[in-house]
Image: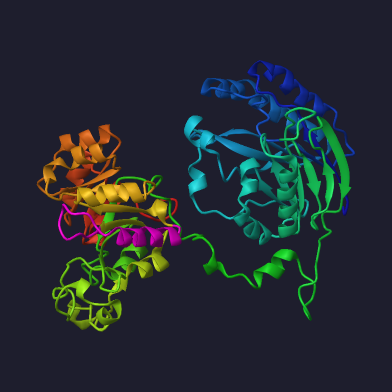
Amino acid sequence: MAQMKVCIIQPLYSADYERSEELFQWQLDAMDACDDSMDLIVLPEATDVPALAKTVAQFHGSYEKYNKIILAKASETAKRCHSILFINALYDSGKGLRNTTYAFDREGKVVGHYFKQHPTNGEVFKRKMDCDYSYEFSNPTVVEIEGLRYCFLTCYDFYFYEIFPNIARQRPDIIIGCSHQRSDRQDALSLMSRFLAYNTNAYVVRSSVSMDENSEIGGGSTVVAPDGRVIIDMASRVGMETCIIDPTKKYYKPAGYGNPDSAHFEYIEVGRRPWKYRPAGSAIILPDEHLSYPRLCAHRGFNTVCPENSMPAFGAAIALGAPEIEFDLWETRDHQIVSIHDSSLERVSDGTGKVWDYTLEELRQFDFGKGFEGAYKGLRIVTFEEILQKFACHVIMNIHVKSFNNVDPMDEDYLKNIIAMIRKYDCEKYVYFMTGNDTLMRQFGALAPDIGRCVGGGNARDLVVERAIEMGCEKVQFMRKHFSKEKIDLAHAHGIRCNIFWSDDPAEAAEWLDWGMDVILTNDYQRMAAGLGDRVKTGFIGS
């Protein structure tokens, strides 16, 4: 079958929850109005919540009342009309409700699900829906029916255009958009759908809701061809519209002098420079605020097998699944930022003197592969930027910014340089600053309030929790012999996470985990990870 008759349905939406029954019945009547001339029927997002649910109770009330009815009607309609039908409603995963697009075949059977990949903050935090899957790596969903490949976006998903090239790689024929955009301009909604179609070489069939027949926002249910041509745009009209498409028809454009015609995404792919973009891909872990606790932090990297504060130490820990690493920063004479624990060079290199007495180029002349029977001979000092270049967003970074003492302020240009480097590599959500210098901690709070801060021991090791509360910091890092379960409980009562510096003994660490410790710094990552097993989380996606 080369040609298909497509039907998009656009219901009226209301912020008045009392109209739910009326609006829900309209959707049922609309499906009753479908007929067997239609090959593809698409309805919008949240058909089982037909009016604005202002409370969680109303949201669950709509689900309980309407979900089974609307899905049964969708199945019956698909079978009666001998049509392929897509509809969005809630789905109980066993862990909670998911925003889900259901695919029905012509016999009325569910042949696939698509779970919204970018749940809104309201879905995550207010309605407490099951969104765990959205923090895991996955390829775009493809449902193949009668030889045609269907991909999906749901409402908010349309705004994340970085996913479009990955969808294009799936070679879709039709992209189904069950949507609920209620506040964006219709010309903007049309632009997004056209951009999607053009970038994936697929038809876009999007169904949304009308805010009012005269509204210039929301609505915009549409059918767009692979060349970006709009076939249907319902604007704010309530009802259904149909058109004929040939889903096998693609758009191929000139791809430069002497090259054969190609799809737009193929033309783009040959010139792609992924290192120019934000960090992305399967190596990215969850940001600090979403990554699970308790966890281990590889102190100065995996420093029992590699020189501390070195790329081999960091890489070994991350490759083994360390979700977090710790390292130290100092400034060189020429204002470069390097990772080394001591202010002096003698313990970790063949150099002498203070790190700030040398330029970076001069420090590069020293051998930082000291020890380990010469296995790392010739290792050079590592810069902060080199760490970020290789590991940004692949691990949480506990950054110990070293200061000359625990009282005096630091040069703000130096601190701004650190912050600028973090922002350059899009790493704000994957790092936090640790220091025992309260003056420095307040400086970071003023210069970069969006980046996490962790209060270290400093000159008041027994008062880290009280200091963190006073300065509004998110974490504390206890020193051994300077904490108790009561201190941990006090921190948790104020929403503060607790690190302990440090342990290489699994039995000792297990006791601290029983007390509620969130992060245990360790020099011996593999031994500790193996000894603690499932009691600690790793940085692997889905773990």
Residue 356 in the image, given as x and y percentages of width and height:
21, 71
Q: Is residue 423 visible?
A: yes
Foreground residue, 299 or 514?
299
Residue with the most extreme left position? 481
Total labels: the figure holds 0
The quarter of the displayed image where residue 79 is located: top right
Q: Is residue 509 magenta?
A: no
Give me the residue at 35% from left, 51% from top: 447
Where is 297 relative to 94, above or below? below
Residue 31 in the image, given as x and y percentages of width and height:
80, 29
Foreground residue, 492 or 402?
402
Where is 138 relative to 474, above or below? below
State which region is magenta. 401-426
Give me the residue at 28% from left, 71% from top: 310
Residue 253 vs residue 432: left or right?
Answer: right
The quarter of the displayed image where residue 147 is located: bottom right
Residue 196 vs residue 464: left or right?
Answer: right
Residue 304 vs residue 81: left or right?
Answer: left
Give me the residue at 80% from left, 66% from top: 252
Give me the residue at 88% from left, 51% from top: 3
The quarter of the displayed image where residue 64 is located: top right
Q: Is residue 411 magenta?
A: yes
